[in-house]
Image: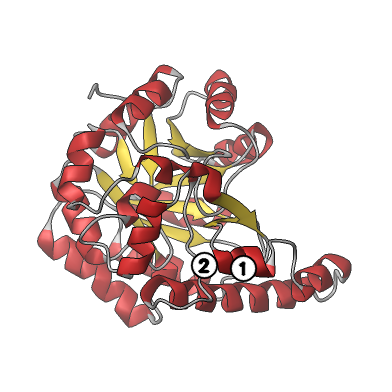
Amino acid sequence: MSKTKLTELLDIEHPIIMAPMFLVSDTGMIIEALKSGITAAFPALNYRTDEEFRSAIDEIRNATDKPFGVNLIVNKSNPKYPQQLITCVDKKVDFIITSLGSPREVIEKSKPVGIKVFCDVTNVQYAKKVAELGADAIIGVGAEAGGHAGNIKIKDLISQLKAEFDIPIISAGGVATKSQIDEMIEAGADGVSVGTVFIAAQECGVSDEYKQALVDYGAKDVVRTSNLSGSPLTVINTPYVQEIGTEPSFLMRMMIKHKKLRKILKMVIAVQGMNKIKKSAFSASYKTYFVAGPSIEHIYKVRPLKEIVEDLV
């Protein structure tokens, strides 16, 4: 693959980030991705304690000197954020990906120690705010993304961002093949963030049932639900999801109506959702949510992570 602003910024071989996936991205996957010539990030929330979080960073550092990042949820739904940021700065991770809030504090504390800050955005308006704050790169999250997706088709979003900014633009959503990566680069992206296809890696620790669902279902089977995290989330439309529906839950409706209770309710909803996703990812039952994007259309079997990367590049 050709060199881009992203490969130059991080000194990596290929302009690909293995996206940070809640509960899915673990140290083994990160290490294997880095050895394959791409970079990767994991959510700080994948670790219950700060000690476990620090240990994960050390484990990756001891295995490779390649650059990797950490994803931080920077709004009120994440009470662990202040300590997670301190740890990232202490450990001097290579880059931080901010989501669901203002990156101001992350940028102010990261810049002095040389940590790059990439910011998730879903539109040009928010991208302008993070660029003014000093973001090193913008991750455009399109409508085709898995997890918390945007509302603008990814090609349109990349074109809009590229017309406004000179810093690296990273495309997130709808990529599972080399031809799709090539399309994003041709559209103006300096790199891509790829998630869903890596859940079907042999090294991934989720249940066999989760991986098989990625093989069995297709793009038409991915829907958005408001029942899990406080924000619309893409999941596979299993019989259980069909049974309970995808409309906002009672707590979600309460959160929307009551501004005074919104912060507390958002935190409660986030915790409940994380517990449901965790249970679904690692143990099979009828009451299961499988988080995934429409790129499952291109997953035909479970393979070694290295082989997935080889196909992408």
Q: Quadrant of residue 252?
A: bottom right
Identify the amino acid type marked 2.
Tyr
Task: From the viewer's perspective, tell me whether residue 6 is left or right of residue 120.
Answer: left
> Which residue appears at 63% of the width and 63% of the height?
242
Q: Position of residue 132 (x, y in %)?
A: 59, 37
Is residue 103 or residue 305 the one in the foreground? 305
> Which residue appears at 30% of the width and 57% of the height?
93
Q: Secondary structure at mark 2?
A: loop
Q: Is residue 19 visible?
A: no
Is residue 214 or residue 305 the one in the foreground? 214
Q: Residue furthest right?
A: 257
Q: Badge 1, how many Cα within 10 Å: few under 14, some, many 20+?
A: many
Name the quadrant of the N terminus.
top left
Identify the amino acid type marked 1.
Leu
Q: Which labelled disc corresponds to residue 21?
A: none
Name the quadrant of the C terminus.
top left
Of marks 1 and 2, the one in the foreground: 2
Between marks 1 and 2, how big is the CA–CA gap? Answer: 9 Å
Q: Position of residue 27 (x, y in %)?
A: 24, 65
Q: Position of residue 241 (x, y in %)?
A: 60, 65
Q: Which labelled disc corresponds to residue 228?
A: 1
Q: Is residue 58 visible?
A: yes
Q: Count all numbered tags in the image, as a single digit.
A: 2
Q: Position of residue 265 (x, y in %)?
A: 73, 76
Q: Which labelled disc corresponds to residue 289?
A: 2
Task: From the viewer's perspective, tell me whether residue 133 is left or right of residue 35.
Answer: right
Mark with earlier residue (1, 2): 1
Q: Quadrant of residue 37?
A: top left
